[in-house]
Image: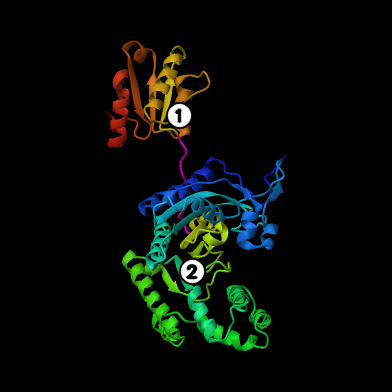
Amino acid sequence: MFETLPGFRDFPPEACARRNHLFRVFKTVARAFDFQEYDAPILEPLDLYVEKSGEEIVGQLFHFEDKGERKVALRPELTPTLARMVASRANSLPKPIKWFNVGEHFRYERPQKGRGRSFYQFNADLLGESGILADAELIALLVAIFETLGLNSELFTVRLSDRTTWVHFLDSLGISDEQRPGVLDAIDKSERRKPEQTQEALDKSVPGRGSELWERIREIKSIDSMETLVEQLEQCGEGGKSRGEDWSKLLALLEAHGAMPCIKIDLSIVRGLAYYTGFVYEVFEKTGEGRALAGGGRYDHLIKKLSGNVDMPAAGFAIGDMTLSDCLESNGLLPTYVIAPDIFVIGGEEQGSEVLATTSAVRKGGFSVSYSFKQAGFGKQFKEAGKSGARYALIIGEEESSTGTIKVKDLRTGGEESFKKPTLLAHLEKLDQEGGIATGE
C-alpha cells in the first residue's frame, strides 16, 4: 500500500471543498480591491532563489538537475517569480501594479503542525507605488479577507512594526550598517529564544555590548502606543521625527479603511528576511496558539536585486492555507460543504434513453444531475436519490413518457408538480428561485 510522501496532503472531495472555500474568499476579496490574478510555473531556475536568499536556501528546497542539465527548483515562494515577471514587462505595465495569486509551493523542511512540504499560499503584491497608501491598501485587504472568513478583532491581531523605525533606533544606539543585519536577526528570533541566547547573539554581532543592547531592545519592543513611539522616534533626530509622522499617517489610513480594531503596534515583529525595507506585519490568533497566519511588508529594493536593472518600490503579503485552516476549524468557522447533485433522475426500465436525454438536457441548463447506474425499481432509485442529497427528483414513468411530461418531486418537502418537457428547464429555474415545491401542490 502506497502512502503520501511526508509533508504532502491528499484532498478527497470534502477536504477539497473546504480548501476551495478559502480560495473563493481569497479571490473574491482580492477582486473587490481591484487586484488582478496571475499565475506562473511552479518550476524555476535554482539561481533565482539563491540570488534572493543566498546559498543556504538550497537545503530548504526541492531541487534537481533536469534532462537539459539545468539546475531547477520547485518554487518555495512567489516573490522572486513575481519580480522576474514584472521586470520583463516593467515599461508596459500601468502603475500601480496590483496582482494576486493562489498557488502551491514547496519547501523541504521537517513537517510539523501548520507547516508541510507542500502548501498553498495566497499572495498579494502592490508594485510601483512608494507611498503609504499602498501599505494601508494591503493591510486593509488582509484584514478584509480574515473578516470575510468569519474572524474578527476578538480572534486575530495584525501586529504592525517597521524596519525603518528599527534602523533609526539602532543608529541611535551606535549600531553600524555591517552590524545591523545580525542585530535585526537576533531581535526577530528573540521571542523564540531564551533571553540569554538573544544576548549571546547580540554580543556576537556587537562584541561586548550584548547585555546592554538587550536591555534597550526590550524597552523598544515594549512600546505599544503611538504617543510613546512618536516620543521615542523624535529622540532619533529629524529622520526619526519624519518616520513618526509616517506612522501617524498609516494608522489614520487604516482607521479610514475600518481596519484599526485589528491593529496592534508591536515592534517585536521585524520579519527575518533581510530584504524588507519599511512597514512589516504578521497576523496571529489572539490566543497566541500556533504559527503566524500571514505576514508581509515593504520590500522596495528586491525587484532591482533580482532583475538587475528595474528599480521599483514594492510591498506585499502572503497567507498560508495550513495555519489558516487550523485557525478556522478551531473556531468553528470552516464550513462543511454538502457535496450533492441538484437533481436525481428516476425512470422506468423502458425509459432508459429518456432518462439519459433528460439528464443531458438539464445538465446543459446549468444543473448538477445524477441518475442510477443500476437497473432497479422505482423504490430503490428513490432511496438512491435520497442518499445522494439531491434537492429534486425528476420522475419519468410510463405515464410521463406517453404524455410528454416529467414529474418533479421536491425531496425536502415531498411536494410534486408535472411539467411538459419543453418547459422543464424554465420551471426548474423558477423553483430554484422560489425555494422549492410546497407540500401538497
Task: Sort mark 2 into few (<14), some (14-19) or many (20+) by Cα contacts within 10 Å.
Answer: many
Q: Which numbered dot is residue 280?
A: 2
- Residue 325 position, x and y percent, is 52, 54
Judge depth for marks 2 and 1 and give the one in front: 2
Amino acid at pointer 2: Val
Residue 175 lies in what quarter of the image? bottom right
Amino acid at pointer 1: Ala
Q: Nearer the viewer, residue 435 or 130?
A: 130
Regarding mark 1 in the picture, which secondary structure is present there?
Answer: helix
Q: Residue at x 48, y 45 (%)?
A: 20
Q: Residue at x 47, y 38 (%)?
A: 339
Task: Sort mark 1 into few (<14), some (14-19) or many (20+) by Cα contacts within 10 Å.
Answer: many
Circle 1 sits on which residue?
Answer: 385
Please state the extent of the stretch shown in magenta in the rendering: 331-340
Q: Please, is residue 251 above or below residue 400 in the view?
A: below
- Residue 430 position, x and y percent, is 28, 31
Magenta segment, prevailing SS (helix, strand or loop): loop
Q: Which of 92 and 336 is in front in this view?
A: 92
Q: Earlier in the sequence, mark 2 or mark 1?
A: 2
- Residue 394 position, x and y percent, is 38, 24
Please indicate, yes or no, whether residue 390 appears anywhere in the rendered image. Answer: yes
Regarding mark 2 in the picture, which secondary structure is present there?
Answer: strand
Mark-to-mark CA distance, 2 and 1:
53 Å
